[in-house]
Amino acid sequence: MKTAGWILIVIGALAFLGAASKGHSVFGPLFWIGIGGVLIYLKREKEETNEKRTAVEPTAPKQPEKPQLEEEKAKTKNVEQFTPVTFEQKEAALCLIAFFAGYNDDLTTDGSAYMVSYQSAIFFGIGNYKETLIAALPKYQDADKLIDTVLTIKDKKSREFILLSCYDLTKMSGKAEAYEFLYNIASEMGYGKEKLHKLIDQYSDRILN
């Protein structure tokens, strides 16, 4: 898997240079570079998981049962805050975030980039991150289709999570093309540069406080 990832990165890089020199869209080559990066991350995570399999997981203590009234309130609260996001939209979101993770080909950032990508599965309630991502990637070989699917997500919290995750990965890589791509997507979502950075500042303030 790791070898295949590097092959895709090399192919994507060559395609990027060809497309850029001819003035063609570079989204396609960048997407393949992103996929290559994802495969490398998955291979690394798999190796780390195999090393930890021998460890014995502690048994979680049994939580006391909540009163029935409290459970009903919790269920009502969750229903009120939830805006439906389809599984297809979740797949596209995972692929887009993984694509931005692919910009981090530096050994000092690739581990952190994987963790940011993995958090997207937790946010969208997907337990089998690796399997879902691998199955979804072939569906979005066309970068335009990927972006169009993500743009159909109307839930505000989901949109902001996607933008903030992509920003974190872009900041890690520090690459100008990643910033440009992020700003274009944010603009399509209704977040111009000023509004996007305001969102980022609000997010940073919540973490610091």
Image: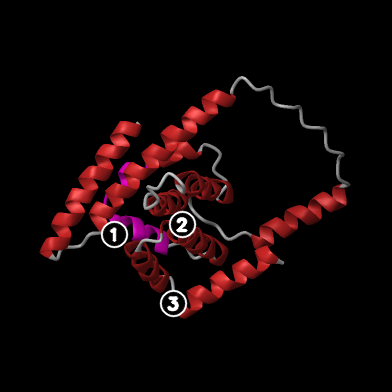
Residue 172 numbered mark, or none: 2
Name the residue beneath numbered marker 1: 144
Nearest-to-viewer mark from 2 and 1: 2
Name the residue beneath numbered marker 3: 193
Q: CA distance from mark 2 to mark 1?
A: 24 Å
Identify the image quadrant of residue 38: top left
Q: Marks 3 and 2: CB-CB under 8 Å?
A: no
Q: Marks 3 and 1: CB-CB under 8 Å?
A: no
Question: Of the residues shown, which amino acid type is indicated by label 1?
Answer: Asp
Question: Of the residues shown, which amino acid type is indicated by label 3?
Answer: Lys
Residue in view at x 46 percent, y 37 percent: 130
Q: Is residue 36 left or right of residue 200?
A: left
Residue in view at x 55 percent, y 72 percent: 199
Residue 145 magenta-drawn?
yes
**Mark before the other along the chain sequence, 3 or 2:** 2
Residue 22 visible to an observer of this rendering: yes
Label the magenta part by its dominant secondary structure: helix
Q: Is residue 46 left or right of residue 65?
A: left
**Mark before the other along the chain sequence, 2 or 1:** 1
Q: Residues in magenta?
A: 134-151
Figure label count: 3
Question: Of the residues shown, which amino acid type is indicated by label 2?
Answer: Met
Q: Nearer the viewer, residue 174 or 207?
A: 174
Asked if 48 appears above or below 127 in the picture, the reply is above
Asked if 136 appears above or below 146 in the picture, the reply is above
Q: Residues within 10 Å of mark 3 (few under 14, many from 20)?
A: some
Q: Nearer the viewer, residue 44 or 189?
A: 44
Q: Residue extending furthest top? A: 54
Secondary structure category for the residue under label 1: helix
